[in-house]
Image (cartoon, grey):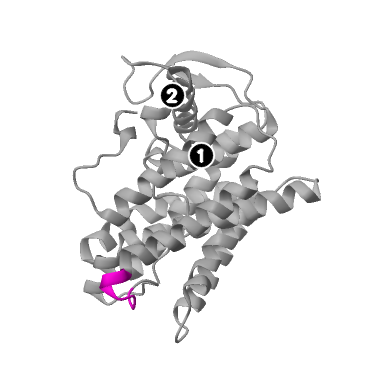
Amino acid sequence: MVIRGSLVFGYLQVQKSELLVREYEAYKAVYCSLCRQMGRDYSLLSRFSLSYDCTFYAMLLMSLSRGCKGFEDGRCRFNPLKKCKYATDEADCLARAAAFSVISAYYKLSDDISDEKFFKRILARLLRPFFGRWRKKAAARYPRLDQAVAEMMTMQAEAEQKDGVSLDEAAHPTAHMTGTVFSLDTDDEMLRRVLYEFGYHIGRWIYLIDAADDLEKDAERGGFNPFKDIDADRLVQYETEVLNQSLARAYEAYNLLTLIDFKGILDNMLLYGFPAKQNQVINKDPEEKDEQKSI
């Protein structure tokens, strides 16, 4: 079983060229703030599990809670000579996103031990004890986050072992986990339903785009992939259709949310960043570069 359900892959990206300068600076501030939070809560090494996906999660939480009251100047923890800005957080959003990052990374490493090639298995075995300790700390503070990812792992294994599993069945564990995580800790039933729907289709998209990205590798090693039986002459069209469907459903739910802080950035990600990443993966264009490499 190959875990595709944690927010550790880096697919949820902005389209830098379509952002205002101040929006990009705010995005970088949230990214750097999450990096700093992970170092504070866990360790320097835990920062290597930082992803754009969890930055998106942190930004969504901060926008929903209005927890960011501004920005402060500081210096990069990796490069003290580099000045940067950090986003303030008065609503526990960064800590929650940091916990989700290390929890997801722990389960990804556990999966790599059983699924990856020799050297990746060795690396995963070396790293897992560290992430195991951080995962326990994160799970003690946010038990429902850990429960959601753990249940997804079990559901994913069961789905992929079934004969003739459909694409929707394969993507459901990831989608359900992401929907559950997005909708935690709100007492508003309507908001919970909207956030679950939004998270469900974001999670479905993450699972499917990762599957599309890994199709050749999975075919070589005989691993499970929901796209493996699709005819080559219609593969690109089919991948595009199912991924567009998820993005469209996610955007419908997103439009029901009342967001103010970071809305321009989140709009950019839904309308430009995710589709651009999707095109890059499906068309496998080596000339197209990720715009966030400069962060």
Quadrant showing the C terminus? top left
Q: Is residue 143 above or below residue 47?
A: below
Q: Residues within 10 Å of mark 1 (few under 14, many from 20)?
A: many
Q: Is residue 177 above or below residue 220?
A: above
Residue found at the far left of this picture: 287
Residue type for callout 1:
Phe
Q: Residue at x 36, y 46 (%)?
A: 277
Q: Is residue 116 above or below residue 32?
A: below
Q: Residue at x 62, y 37 (%)?
A: 61
Q: Residues within 10 Å of mark 2 (few under 14, many from 20)?
A: some
> Which element carries disc 1, helix, strand or loop?
helix
Cα–Cα gap, marks 2 and 1: 13 Å
Residue type for callout 2:
Tyr
Q: Can you identify the residue that label 2 sits on?
A: 24
Left or right side of 188 for 141: left
130 magenta-colored: no
Residues in magenta, as a range: 228-234
> Which element carries disc 2, helix, strand or loop?
helix
Q: Residue at x 54, y 44 (%)?
A: 99
Q: Position of residue 65 (x, y in %)?
A: 69, 32
Nearest to the eye among marks 2 and 1: give it.
Answer: 2
Q: Residue at x 47, y 38 (%)?
A: 269
Specify the label residue 87 is tagged with.
none
Q: Is residue 228 above or below residue 53?
A: below
Q: Position of residue 143 (x, y in %)?
A: 65, 53
Specify the label residue 56 is tagged with.
1
Can residue 18 be seen here? yes
Quadrant showing the N terminus? bottom left
Left or right side of 260 for 12: left
Residue 235, located in which quarter of the rendered image? bottom left
Left or right side of 196 for 228: left
